[in-house]
């Protein structure tokens, strides 16, 4: 009995090895998964090179940065640039525009993508379904430069939009749609939906395929209508994906975009089109105030990080799917 007791004790002590002794096991697992590790190396290098290395430039937000001077000769000003941001009226205007544009993009993006995914899932004609999918995906692969040109042409005074509205008696004369600021948010939201709705449905269609088909069969036998099956089976099945994507989008609420605002905006709509990214561009490159532009970028990053953590914590407390 004593010998058996000693052997079991030694075996247990081996299983509960220290972190240091556990390193060989870690490297063994790493060697077994070397193909996956090698595949991830280019991404990690890209992430470090383009996302983490540039962070050293954040120090310019605490300096009165002058490009002609060496780094050691720059004047340190502490939080002065951050104070200057919140004293700029233009900053509050672009912050308002950013939040509104992101809110419109968030709501329309979720509603249209989920609705299109459900409608495509309900189609029984596979040929028609593939045609609709292809047509809805194509705009995503068109660059914003080309897309903005198409949108500008369609919304011109002699464009197809004005022609159709006048022909149907909805307008008495042509409207310069991109010349009125109050129309810009709606145009931007519609443009984002047109360009990305097909692409955004891919993940929802993939999530729908994971739902057990027997649930639909059982509901149909019980007399549930198609709408009831969507309401009580499809949407609950999509809920985890919707929550995860919602958390990610809340974290990017200050990332309302750059290209569509920059390409579709003009001097007549600047009050509604300029957002934080354009604000950083103007102050950094056009006005040469790199320190103020960097401070604005840091503000956006910090707020986005706080929103992401907060949204994830709320989802955790509610018992929903979360990122971590």
Image (cartoon, rainbow, N blue to C red):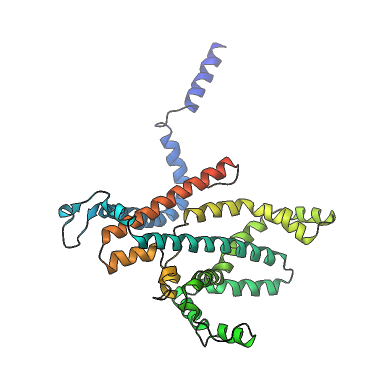
Percent coordinates x, y for residue 136 in the rendering: 59, 72
Q: Is residue 26 left or right of residue 137?
A: left
Relative depth, front residue between 144 and 282: 282
Residue 1 appearing in the image: yes
Quadrant housing residue 264: bottom left
- Image quadrant holding the N terminus, namely top right
68 relative to 323, above or below: below
104 relative to 321, above or below: below
Percent coordinates x, y for residue 197 in the rendering: 57, 67
Relative depth, front residue between 310 and 138: 310
Residue situated furthest top in the rendering: 2
Percent coordinates x, y for residue 130 in the rendering: 65, 72
102 relative to 317, above or below: below
- Which residue appears at 31% of the width and 55% of the height? 295
Q: Is residue 145 left or right of residue 154?
A: left
Residue 48 appearing in the image: no
Percent coordinates x, y for residue 256 in the rendering: 46, 62
- Which residue appears at 68% of the width and 63% of the height? 118
166 relative to 135, above or below: below
**Tally of marks:** 0
Relative depth, front residue between 320 and 142: 320
Relative depth, front residue between 156 and 109: 156
- Which residue appears at 51% of the width and 81% of the height? 155
């Amino acid at each position: 009995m004593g010998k058996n007791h000693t052997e079991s004790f030694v075996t247990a002590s081996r299983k509960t090895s220290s972190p240091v002794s556990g390193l060989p096991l870690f490297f063994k697992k790493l060697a077994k998964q070397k193909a996956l590790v090698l595949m991830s190396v280019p991404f990690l290098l890209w992430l470090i090179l383009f996302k983490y290395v540039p962070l050293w430039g954040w120090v310019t937000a605490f300096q009165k940065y002058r490009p002609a001077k060496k780094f050691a000769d720059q004047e340190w000003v502490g939080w002065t640039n951050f104070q200057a941001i919140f004293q700029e009226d233009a900053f509050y205007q672009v912050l308002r525009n950013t939040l509104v544009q992101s809110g419109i993009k968030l709501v329309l993006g979720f509603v249209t993508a989920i609705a299109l995914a459900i409608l495509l899932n309900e189609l029984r004609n596979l040929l028609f379904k593939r045609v609709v999918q292809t047509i809805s995906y194509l705009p995503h692969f068109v660059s914003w430069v080309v897309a903005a040109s198409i949108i500008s042409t369609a919304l011109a005074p002699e464009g197809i939009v004005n022609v159709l509205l006048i022909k149907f008696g909805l307008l008495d004369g042509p409207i310069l749609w991109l010349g009125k600021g109050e129309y810009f948010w709606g145009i931007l939201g519609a443009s984002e939906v047109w360009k990305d709705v097909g692409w955004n449905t891919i993940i929802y269609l993939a999530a729908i395929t994971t739902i057990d088909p027997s649930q639909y069969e059982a509901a149909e036998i019980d007399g549930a209508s198609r709408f009831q099956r969507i309401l009580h089976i499809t949407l609950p099945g999509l809920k985890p994906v919707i929550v995860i994507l919602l958390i990610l989008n809340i974290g990017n609420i200050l990332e309302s975009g750059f290209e569509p605002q920059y390409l579709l905006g003009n001097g007549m709509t600047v009050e509604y089109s300029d957002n934080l990214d354009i604000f950083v561009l103007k102050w950094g490159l056009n006005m040469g105030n790199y320190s103020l532009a960097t401070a604005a970028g840091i503000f956006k990053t910090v707020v986005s990080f706080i929103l992401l953590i907060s949204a994830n914590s709320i989802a955790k407390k509610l018992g929903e799917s979360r990122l971590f």
